[in-house]
Image (cartoon, helix red, strand yellow):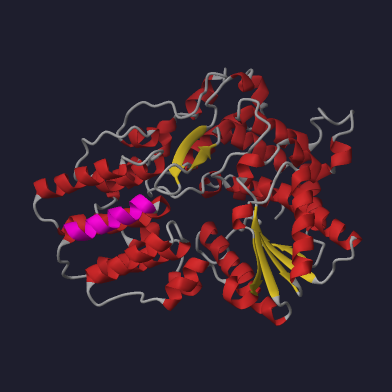
């Protein structure tokens, strides 16, 4: 991309927030209004002391395992986001970044397949990214079985939370240049500007970058690409040349001819990552493994080997439920649910809808990652219950069941999508849900902003498209939740 194209791409609403939300949430108007107010102006001249304030970004907690593991998803403060995008895509800065990525991609035996993609086929960017993973990682791994005998898997522990913000400047400008006494606070270096912006939005923290946007995915690729580059140099120095590595974000697949070579590469990778403040997740580092069979994830292999559906609707759902017990939060579980949703959406006769709802809620309870498609299935099953009072009773039971989970912000957003039409009196604590109900809510801390027009542009009420909300039907359509044609990749 040119600098101009990159700016347009990163300022798209789906790049600002790549978290799955109901269709009535949109950030287009907000980003546009903030961009207009910042055009030709310095954010510093319109504000003061941002690092002195907490809650500058908005954090939503997403439950990962139905228990106590959670992932913080952040909506970056729009004024900081727009400013950072503008800085990164200044032609001179963009050239530096592009040139650096060319260096990172020069080693032929280490291939990164997770740099953000702009869709060219009419589908969503996220769908195109999933397609790139399937083609580059899964299919690419199978193809490499022709050349290599063994596969090692490795990934980084809490990658985004562990990234040291100063390492961004090291990645772009080299560590030697970035750490030179004349450059440590030199804001002419784009690496320092990115580092500073991330500290601004996180109360001065230097450990961790926020999750939930394409921009931060891109910035993480700078650090991880730098690690790839350093790893390649070390391995070349040690005369380790017979290998291939496919990396997708913090996930590594290492292909070798012998187990000994694989262990040597893992040792070197560990050393490189430690220098950047990162470390491998020992629980997810495996090998040596036969290549073809382990090119597919374990949950996917199990799903292919097992029975996938039944003519009886409830038995079909119980098959999916069983897979969810064995592989909670798995990608194959989401795909199985999408297929069930397609089937139930077309069903002319549905028996025992409350029993089916109970099974779906149990799946969502153990696999919160699947909540969007679970919500869609539930919305269809609710429509079959003819008695209004019975329907409201079921909704309240769903609400109380899922509210037992800790950190349920993302779940609440999707529960509201299906309860809004039937029982609008339910009270949700999630701020985005309160916006839907028309309440006045401070999503981001704007106390550090002094310019009145910029503050007005940051009105969070713009996030909810009221016309879209009114136009949606109680039953979630497959189009609302389907990112891609599932048969293509699964």
Query: In this view of the protein, can residue 475 be seen by the observer?
Result: no
Question: Picture coordinates of residue 150 (x, y %)?
Answer: 69, 73
Q: Residue at x 62, y 44 (%)?
A: 160
Q: Is residue 232 left or right of residue 65?
A: right
Q: Quadrant of residue 87?
A: top right
Q: Of residues 318 and 385, which is closer to you in this image?
A: 318
Extent of the magenta region: 354-366
Q: Residue at x 86, y 34 (%)?
A: 179
Q: Quadrant of residue 269?
A: bottom right
Q: Of residues 361 and 121, which is closer to you in this image?
A: 361
Task: Classify 104 as above or below 41.
Answer: below
Q: Quadrant of the N terminus?
A: bottom right
Q: Residue at x 67, y 79 (%)?
A: 145
Question: Picture coordinates of residue 120 (x, y %)?
Answer: 58, 64
Q: Quadrant of residue 142?
A: bottom right
Q: Of residues 472 and 228, which is closer to you in this image?
A: 228
Task: Classify 230 as above or below 286.
Answer: above
Is residue 238 rendered magenta in the image?
A: no
Q: Residue at x 37, y 52 (%)?
A: 366
Q: Of residues 70 and 177, which is closer to you in this image?
A: 70
Question: Picture coordinates of residue 350 (x, y %)?
Answer: 17, 67
Is residue 365 rendered magenta in the image?
A: yes
Q: Is residue 91 left or right of residue 352?
A: right
Furthest residue in direction bottom, as rendered: 146
**Most common secondary structure along the magenta stretch:** helix
């Amino acid at each position: 991309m040119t600098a101009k194209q990159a700016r347009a791409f990163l300022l798209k609403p789906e790049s600002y927030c790549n978290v799955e939300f109901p269709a009535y949430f949109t950030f287009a108007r907000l980003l546009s209004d903030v961009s207009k107010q910042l055009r030709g102006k310095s954010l510093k001249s319109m504000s003061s002391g941002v690092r002195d304030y907490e809650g500058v970004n908005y954090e939503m907690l997403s439950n990962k395992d139905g228990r106590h593991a959670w992932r913080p998803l952040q909506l970056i403060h729009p004024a900081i986001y727009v400013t950072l995008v503008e800085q990164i895509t200044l032609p001179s800065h963009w050239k530096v970044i592009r040139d650096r990525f060319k260096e990172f991609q020069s080693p032929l035996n280490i291939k990164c397949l997770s740099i953000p993609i702009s869709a060219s086929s009419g589908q969503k960017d996220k769908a195109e990214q999933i397609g790139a993973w399937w083609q580059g990682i899964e299919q690419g791994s199978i193809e490499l079985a022709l050349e290599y005998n063994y596969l090692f898997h490795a990934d980084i522990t809490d990658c985004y939370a562990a990234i040291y913000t100063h390492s961004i400047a090291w990645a772009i400008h080299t560590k030697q240049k970035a750490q030179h006494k004349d450059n440590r606070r030199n804001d002419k270096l784009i690496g320092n500007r990115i580092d500073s912006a991330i500290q601004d939005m996180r109360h001065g923290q230097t450990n961790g970058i926020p999750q939930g946007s394409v921009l931060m995915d891109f910035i993480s690729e700078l650090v991880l690409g730098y690690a790839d580059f350093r790893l390649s140099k070390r391995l070349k120095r040690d005369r380790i040349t017979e290998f291939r590595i496919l990396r997708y974000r913090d996930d590594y697949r290492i292909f070798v001819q012998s187990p000994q070579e694989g262990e040597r590469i893992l040792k070197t990778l560990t050393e490189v990552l430690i220098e950047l403040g990162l470390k491998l997740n020992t629980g997810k580092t495996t090998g040596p493994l036969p290549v073809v069979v382990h090119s597919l994830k374990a949950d996917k292999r199990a799903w292919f080997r097992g029975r996938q559906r039944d003519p009886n609707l409830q038995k079909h759902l119980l098959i999916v439920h069983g897979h969810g017990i064995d592989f909670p939060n798995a990608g194959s579980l989401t795909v199985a649910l999408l297929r069930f949703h397609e089937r139930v959406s077309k069903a002319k006769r549905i028996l025992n809808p409350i029993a089916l709802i109970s099974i779906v809620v149990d799946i969502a309870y153990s696999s919160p990652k699947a909540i969007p498609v679970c919500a869609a299935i539930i919305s269809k099953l609710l429509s079959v219950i003819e008695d209004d009072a019975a329907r409201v009773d079921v909704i309240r039971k769903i609400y109380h069941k899922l509210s037992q989970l800790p950190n349920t912000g993302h779940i609440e957003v999707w529960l509201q999508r299906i309860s809004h039409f039937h029982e609008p009196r339910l009270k949700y604590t999630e701020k985005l849900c309160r916006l839907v109900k028309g309440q006045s809510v401070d999503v981001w801390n704007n106390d550090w902003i002094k310019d009145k027009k910029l503050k007005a542009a940051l009105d969070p009420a713009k996030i909810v498209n009221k016309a879209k909300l009114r136009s949606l039907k109680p039953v979630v359509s497959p189009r609302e939740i389907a990112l891609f044609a599932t048969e293509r990749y699964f």
